[in-house]
Image (cartoon, grey):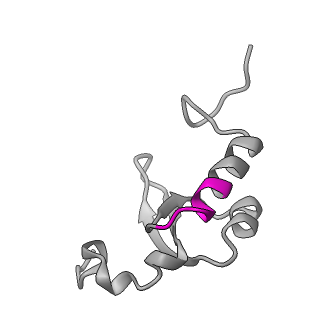
Amino acid sequence: MAPQTRYQHEMTEEDHFLLAQTLSHIQGMAILSGYLSPLYEHFYAGWTRISKTTTTNGNSTATEHLWLSPNAADHTRLPLFHNKQT
């Protein structure tokens, strides 16, 4: 029996590496959502990280993170971040 996971489709460390390689070579903007981890801190060290504590479906708290690629780092240009109160 496979170990219990939170998600139906988990990424392997190699999957994360390949995604980071792909995202580091794009010319456009990229935003990656996830939880803080040493792997993400390593792969996205030059990216801007925005953090927000939120309530989960299970009524506990979690800190969600967005990593913005260098081309997306001026997030004031993105409608997602325009002066919304959450």
In front here: 86 or 48? Answer: 48
Q: Is residue 66 above or below residue 8?
A: below
- Residue 69 position within the rendered picture, expressed as x and y whole percent measured from the top left: 53, 72
**Residue 79 x %, y %:** 24, 75
Q: How many marks?
A: 0
Residue in the image at 76% along x and 67% along y = 42
Residue displayed at 68% across by 56% down = 21
Q: Nearer the viewer, residue 2 or 56?
A: 2
Residue in the image at 43% along x and 53% along y: 56
Measured as percent of width and height from the top left, residue 53 is found at 47, 70
Is residue 29 inside the magenta stretch?
no
Q: Tell me where residue 30 appears, x and y as whole percent.
A: 47, 64
Q: Quadrant of the N terminus?
A: top right
| Magenta segment boundaries in residue numbering | 21-27
* Quarter that holds the C terminus: bottom left
User: Magenta span has 25?
Assistant: yes
From what the image shows, is residue 60 above or below residue 52?
above
Image-quadrant location for residue 77: bottom left
